[in-house]
Amino acid sequence: MVVVDNRSAVRRVLLITLCLNLVVMGLKVWVGWWTGSLSLLADALHSVTDSANNVLGLVASRFSSPVPDREHPYGHQKFEAVGALGIAAFLGIACFEILQGAIERILKGSEPVRISGPELWFLLIILGINIFVAFYERHVGRRVGSPILIADAQHTMSDVWVTISVLAGLIGIWIFKFQWLDIVLAFPVALLVFFSGWSVLKQNLPWLVDEIAIAPEAVHEIAMTVPGVINCHAIASRGIVGRQVFIEMHLVVDVKDVESAHQITEEVESRLEQRFGPARILTHVEPPSYQSAQISYEDSHL
């Protein structure tokens, strides 16, 4: 199996988006400080995590080579999943900070928000940059199969909705003088941030805890289509389909020489690679007396 290393493309995208996120963060901090808007400053905090996530992604990508070595015979791709979990942690911190700021402003009061047309135009520019970053990262992430780019694009997309809600609130303050909108909008901002972090966690945790990647019945069905295979059992899998999967199975073949058995297992592995690749497959060839009706992996096989 040829292992494809797309880390250079990932790093290039992360560097571009890091520069754009720094611009967005700076504009939000400046407008938020100038107007006194809590919701916009909370949104700026969200953008701080965007930049931090890019840096984290660059570090994770540096160590997440899919090519195995002596110390890491299964490759290093879990480093990238760890980086994605770091993004989830940053989002959790941002959610807490936003809620804390909103509650403090309710209890202690604050100065009224001062907003005008130029500040709203700045926010429209910020919104456009965020939309570009989200779609750009997601497109490249799906093309090269990078979880760190897909996770960061999802985070940036949450930033788009946050900016839209904050912009709507500030327009309401500008036109109708509804000062309470600024505090009220801080709470859905926090919920959007939390939901984004939870989605990233849910997508990457299965990779780290070796959750089943492919139903054993699906592997069994493909293996049994190969002539010479009379039984397939004790099937286990881990990883993520489309990114990297590892499959282990016991195969009973109806041949008596090693060379024929090897050709059959090669054909089984080739068909599985075509269906679920990239994949690394370990096949235990067994004689007919070792047949079993237990398709999935059991403790008795440890």
Image (cartoon, rainbow, N blue to C red):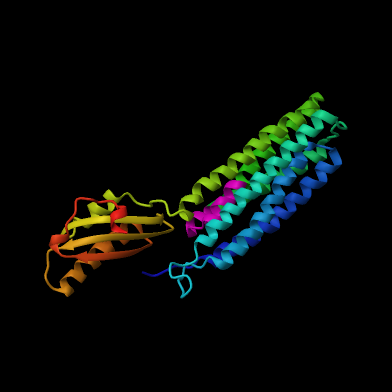
Residue 171 visible in the displayed image: no
Q: Which quarter of the image is occupied by the C terminus? A: bottom left
Residue at image coords 54%, 44%: 199
Residue 184 in which image quadrant = top right
Residue at image coords 33%, 55%: 236
Q: What x and y, as percent, mark residue 277?
A: 36, 60
Q: What x and y, as percent, mark residue 245?
A: 39, 59
Between 115 and 214, the one lying in front of the other is 214
Describe residue 186's horizontal placement relative to residue 254 as left or right: right
Q: What x and y, as percent, mark residue 276?
A: 34, 56
Residue at image coords 50%, 60%: 78
| Residue range corresponding to the magenta coloring | 139-155
Against 204, residue 181 (above or below) is above
Secondary structure that dominates the magenta span: helix
Against 207, residue 178 (above or below) is above
Q: Is residue 140 magenta?
A: yes
Q: What x and y, as percent, mark residue 284?
A: 25, 65
Extreme residue toward the right, this view: 111
